[in-house]
Image: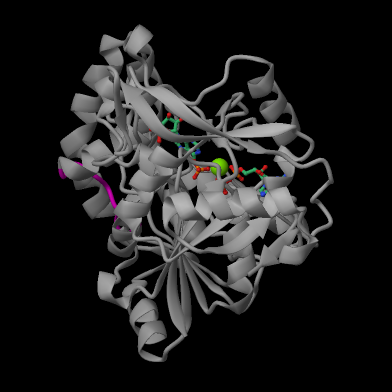
Amino acid sequence: MSVTAVVGAQWGDEGKGRIIDYLASDAHVVIRCQGGDNAGHTVVNDLGTFKLHLIPSGIFHPNCLCILGAGTVVNPAALLEEMAELRAAGLSLDNFRLEQRAHVLLPYHRELDGLEDERRGAASIGTTKRGIGPAYADKAARHGVRVGDLLNPAYLERRLRLTLDSRNDRLRDYGRPPLELPTLLAQAAAWADALRPYIVDSLPFVQNAVQRGHTLVLEGQLAALRDLDWGTYPYVTSSNPTAAGLCQGAGLAPRHLDEVVGVVKAYSTAVGAGPMPTELHDAAGARLRDVGQEFGASTGRPRRCGWYDAVAVGHSAWLNGFSHLAITKLDVLDGWDELKVCVAYDLDGQRVTLLPDTPAMERAVPVYETVPGWREPTVQARRWTDLPLNARHYVERLAELAQTPVRFVSVGPHRDALIVL
Ligand code: GDP
Ligand code: IMO
Ligand code: MG
């Protein structure tokens, strides 16, 4: 029995989905804890290739209960579309549950996200335009609508009446047509019909699983550098993608957590704006993007690529309390003569190893250590000793810098392309 949180240690897209798909084979429950359909979690297994946005990455294991937790913001239209795609691929959703306390991401959230981020102009965050910021803002301002409200039309109408006028005023400011209450209510009624069988109070399931000593996996969305409190604000998302944030979103006290797996890519990538000191604008960056196929799973945007940043991962290691690392995409580094690892930043002439706050981080210059690469392909490696010696040294160096032991090394997107230490 164990409760394991799986979190992104960098800027997202580290391969959380594939690690969770693997861990879920032994899990009773997987809970997606925060975020919304800004996520794109890719899972490649014998059933096919899947890009999950809201459905937890344990869904491929019929005996694993998959909960979309209270800390999430759920666009019902996007969820239903994803459910239809999974059904069309032959999957059952009998093991899926949607927590009644999760917030509903409404059409005006999505529209306002795009408009507001565009209005920021040069200071744009580069959000996924999925409505995440506006939905969490309404939640915090207590203007939100929750999933359970969909099942109570009279209550839902009262909630929407409270908010819709002011949201429509904002849409009109942008020259957009307002949304009509009857249209929204009709849409919500259709969502309620389709989602009713899945909507539950998930807390009894979680309590029961913990009390019986079952295995639970908490699925993180995004990553620590985009954490609302401790990331590179304002270039962050609107939830807390840390182990503590996951506990909160799942309805679990932190003392129930046994392990925290920090998923780290063997190099750095980010989508969206904000400081990324190791970003490469040269042929090396293009090579990482090409070989790693670094294009966003949700938006298709090319990801910014750069060398591994141990300062950034050290920041996440502290915030999350990693018990282990899962190092992904090691195969993407095959065939380089040498590799660089950022071990500190030069900040106005001072060497720093703690992550500076955003404006200072924008001035930070990476201090690199150069390490030897390896020529041999790693894609077939399934045991630690199958890896070339320099690849092992590289992994060991990342572990040393993060002061965290490595549990997993992945060398390809498929579930099986994994070395378990
Ligand atoms: P997540 O959001 O953290 O789940 O990660 P994404 O799915 O957005 O991005 C990870 C991408 O890398 C996906 O396209 C995965 O299929 C792919 N991937 C994951 N692990 C590996 C690996 O070890 N090697 C290679 N080459 N690709 C991988
Ligand atoms: P997964 O879970 C990578 C980025 C956006 C933007 C910032 C805020 O697949 O790792 P938001 O839409 O959340 O308001 O955007 O966060 N971002 C992601 N980057 N992977 C994701 O999800 C992301 N979700 C949001 O690009 O910089
Ligand atoms: Mg992703």
Q: Write down the region rendered in magenta.
A: 142-150
Q: Nearer the viewer, residue 103 or 384?
A: 384
User: In terms of depth relative to the viewer, which is nearer, 75 or 158?
Assistant: 75
Q: Report the residue at 77% width, 53% height from top.
A: 388
Question: What is the x, y in percent for residue 197?
Answer: 49, 68
Task: Tell me, yes or no, whether the highlighted magenta stretch contains residue 397.
Answer: no
Residue 365 screen position, x and y as percent: 40, 21
Counting from the top left corner in percent of width and height, residue 154 is at 24, 53
Query: Is 145 inside the magenta-drawn segment?
Result: yes
26 relative to 313, above or below:
below
**Residue at x 42%, y 57% (from the top left corner):** 403
Q: Quadrant of residue 269?
A: top right
Residue 302 visible in the picture: yes
Q: Position of residue 69 (x, y in %)?
A: 38, 61
The answer to whether residue 401 is above or below residue 229 is below
* Residue at 49% across, 41% down: 12
Model colouring:
one colour
